[in-house]
Amino acid sequence: MRDNSPFHFKASSFMGQANCIRRICLDLSAVISELSPTKHSFASLLARISSVTPPVPNPSISYWQEDPPFPNLVDIQSPGLPTTADIVVIGSGISGASLAYTILTQFDKRGISPEIVLLEARDLCSGATGRNGGHIKCSPYVEYAGLKARFGVEHAKKLLGFQRRNLAAILDLVQQNEALKASEAREVQTVDVFTDEGMWVKAKKMVQELRQDAPDMAEDIVVHDGTEACETPRGQIPAAYVVHATDAFAANLLPGLKGKIFPVRGHITAQNPGTLFPKLGGARSWSFIHRRGFDYVSQRPGRGELIAGGGLVQSPEQGMDEFGIWRDDRTCFAIRAYLDGLLPTMFGTHNWGADTGARVKRAWTGCMGFTPDLLPYVGIPDQKITQRKVPTARSSKDAKHPAE
């Protein structure tokens, strides 16, 4: 299945967020619904996702972190902790960075310079954003079916439109800022390959449903059937507002989210293409959808390295043991072995050829935050979530309506 929609693009170095989150959600749903976990393994899973663990100090190094476009920013830190701030943003990934950027640019237009402090537990952008799989992908036919079942037709179309506009907004942002060109953000043609007949039939039904309800969102989808299938350690910062953009680690600072936001560890590799692999200039990505689970591949422009991730159900407990795992300093041997051999097998030796030296250049993991219903938490958390009293301003003159 090919999607020629202009809303699909790569963002390799700077903004990824493994982008294929909804795909991963589909994978997780399959794992939970089709596995019959033992009582012990399921109890262990519940215990893991109901606990909290801060980011480990020595995580695995992702491919993007080997050669960052702005190395002087990686471990940048102010000489001293600010004594006060208007806004404190916790987390420097795509959510935290986007929020800080938007606040600064919008206030600048009004001639206002708010004091913003961005806090990060490790290096800048060292969480899931800096460990992404090389692309940001919205699959309309997959997205719509789930949203419609949950919210109805009209709300589903609005939510899907919002997602697609966000993709376009990110691409526009990169094109308008020279410093962001290193992100390699670009539109690409995507290909979804189904290896299971049942999943293929289900996908075609979802495409048909989207065409009936929102034809404008399905006009670029082409279905190929038959033979061609294609608290900071340095002290405190008084602030009027605190923004939590910590993804999988949110419950560390928001205790009421224990068990409501939990990590799922993803595995990704950077691999050199074989001698016969087509030179597509980074203009295409692939998804391999199986009966249980899926894998995804993207290609960088220029040097052409392939970024391949997935393999969740290849773990010893078929993916269940990757839920509630906070360690991005380790990899699962079985998943790593699977990904190492994935590409020549899926593309075939006639399309791959011989390896050019070491095939795998780097393998790493990232902890992605998930919720039981796969929907995000957005807004002001109440005291049940923060387990903290909201401070009140000392005088009406200084009142800023403090909030998290």
Image (cartoon, helix red, strand yellow):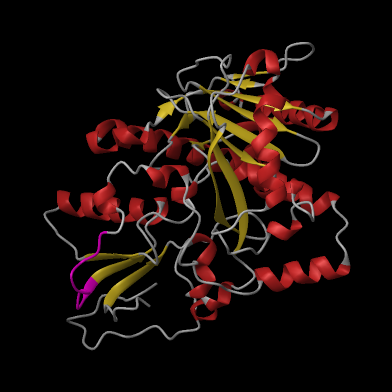
Pinpoint residue 354: horizontal percent, then vertical percent.
61, 19
Quadrant in the rendering for residue 241: bottom left
Residue 378 highlighted magenta (yes or no): no
Determine whether 387 is above or below 166 in the image. below
Determine whether 49 is above or below 287 in the image. below
Q: Left or right of 21: which side holds 129?
A: left
Question: Which of 18 and 258 lies nearest the eye of the viewer?
Answer: 18
Question: Which of 247 and 13 lies nearest the eye of the viewer?
Answer: 13
- Number of residue marks: 0
Determine whether 246 is above or below 54 in the image. above
The C terminus appears in which quarter of the rendering? bottom left
Quadrant in the rendering for residue 69: top left
Q: Left or right of 344: which side holds 171?
A: left
Pinpoint residue 176: horizontal percent, then vertical percent.
25, 33
Residue 82 highlighted magenta (yes or no): yes
Q: Main secondary structure of the magenta part?
A: loop
Q: Residue placed at 28% from the left, 51% from the top?
A: 101
Question: Which of 8 and 351 lies nearest the eye of the viewer?
Answer: 351
Pinpoint residue 130: horizontal percent, then vertical percent.
44, 49
Can residue 43 be seen at all in this image of the molecule?
yes
Can residue 146 be seen at all in this image of the molecule?
no
Magenta span: 76-85
Q: Left or right of 80: which side holds 267?
A: right
Quadrant in the rendering for residue 91: bottom left
Pinpoint residue 275: horizontal percent, then vertical percent.
56, 16
Furthest-top residue in this view: 227
Q: Residue placed at 63% from the left, 18% from the top?
A: 352
Furthest-bottom residue in this view: 394
The N terminus appears in which quarter of the rendering? top right
